[in-house]
Amino acid sequence: MSEPHPNLFLVVDDREFSTEEVRSLVGQRRFGDIIFQRRTLFEHFRASLPQWAQQRLLRLRSAEDLPPLRAALAASGEDCAICIIAGRAGFAQPERLRQLIERLPYAEEDFTDRLYQPLLAFLHNGHALVADWAAFEAAPLHRWERAWHGSQRVQALEALDLGLIRDLLSFTTGATAARHFNQVQADNYYYTKSSADCRKLEAEYRFYQLVPEAMQPWLVQPFDYREQAGRASYRMQRFYLADAALQWVHDAFDAASFTAFIERLLFFLAQRPRRDCGKAQSAAAARALFVDKLEQRASQFLAMDEGRRINALVQSSTPELALERQLERFRRLYARHEAGFALEQMAIGHGDPCFSNVLYDQSRYLLKLIDPKGALSEEELWTHPFYDLCKVSHSVLGDYDFINNGLYQVSFADDNRLVLQLRQGQHAPLKALFRQQLRAQGYDARLLRLGEASLFLSMLPLHIDIPNKIVAFLLKAHAILDEVESD
């Protein structure tokens, strides 16, 4: 195959901001800046291209980016070609996009993905765009009113219009991230989850059957459990709902919508069945969740070569960030507040109601929880009442979803100490609303924050593949312990 077309321009037109229809999910931002699976939409698009195309890719973000493109086109020979892709285009099958881009240098005819308002348009003669430059300056191709009758229609690739809430939900809910030991497949109607950890998957499946009926409407029902060839699987109905983490990191909640959401989530937790127990039993359950598990995970982390390397790195710049120091500090603070964990009841626990496991529709107040920790017996349903609350607070006050989605930066201050900066919007008022809700229900935020610190430190060995995230978790845990101590 010959060298790629020397005068081929590949352009993502991302001048347009999110439509009103999808702002309840992603806030107001350019489509290319939407985050899913820890990367922006533009980064996903670029990663799906062959290497030569990545080097030629241009992104239009504003009117200021137009003159350089026009000058480059004008300076090119008569054989220049251009492919323009809307920033709002989503490609559910990136391998097909890659195949199409590989063939672009050898295309001899104009083509688009649709007759009207195309999300992808290839012009064999790039100078044709210069002839329509006034119209292109005024609006991206996908907003032009004209019909593209003279162009062929590409059949091998379907672009979703992420400006439509239906297509955005189809794109994001079909791109479910899974741990390395899990697989999740989606079609138009069902998710199929499979894993080599058969016991874990069976526990998730049995959980729905074991919980009381009053909890079941809040959960997505699994069915069709199977074990075969060392793997287990079950299916769930596919709900076209965005998870709360997507909405939270995109600043899509305002005071009213967040209040409605968090009230429902806390209502679910408040209405969970309880059973009486002695304070000693409750305290022991809390210690097992927040102290014993943390100590086990800390030992696991420090037994890893990479874990010891990261720990030494942070200790050299900011000694109090070292895991041993934080663990010692956590034990001291936990001992000071341990009486607050000694309750007289146990509760049925979901086990992981972080925002990425909460599906929510703001317009219909519809809330569904997915991916419970699971249970194989009724006894395994019961847990300390604070644990699920700590998981929720972990997302609201702890900024877990920002760190998990890469919306942070770890850098050095002037004194060479490590600092954590989060790329978040107007969340401070919403955090204050959450604290008000906790106080109204009689919870001591210090206890939940102490539980959050345990969660952050416990996750270190689970995210060892992303060292920068480990440092962010250590910084966040340290900040939480500072808050608890100052209170």
Image (cartoon, rainbow, N blue to C red):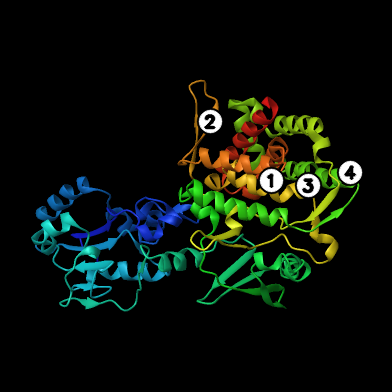
> On the picture, is 410 further left or further right than 454?
left
Asked whether residue 248 appears in the rendered view, the answer is no
Q: Residue at x 79, y 33 (%)?
A: 337
Quarter holding residue 322:
top right
Badge number at residue 279: 4
Q: Secondary structure at mark 4?
A: helix
Residue at numbered disc 3 = 289
Q: Is residue 158 above or below residue 297?
A: below
Q: Earlier in the sequence, mark 4 or mark 3?
A: 4
Residue appearing at x 78%, y 29% in the figure: 332
Q: Position of residue 482 (x, y in %)?
A: 65, 28
Q: Nearer the viewer, residue 152 or 289?
A: 289
- Answer few, some or many: residues within 10 Å of disc 4's Cα (few below 14, many 20 plus, some between 14 and 19): some
Label placed on residue 288: none
Amino acid at pointer 2:
Val
* Image disc number at residue 390: 1
Q: CA distance from mark 2 to mark 1?
A: 24 Å
Q: Which residue is mark 2?
A: 419
Graded by Cα atoms within 10 Å as few (under 14), some (14 to 19) or many (20 or more), the crowding at tag 3 reads some
Mark 4 to mark 3: distance in Å?
15 Å
Amino acid residing under circle 4: Lys
N-terminal-most mark, 4 or 2: 4
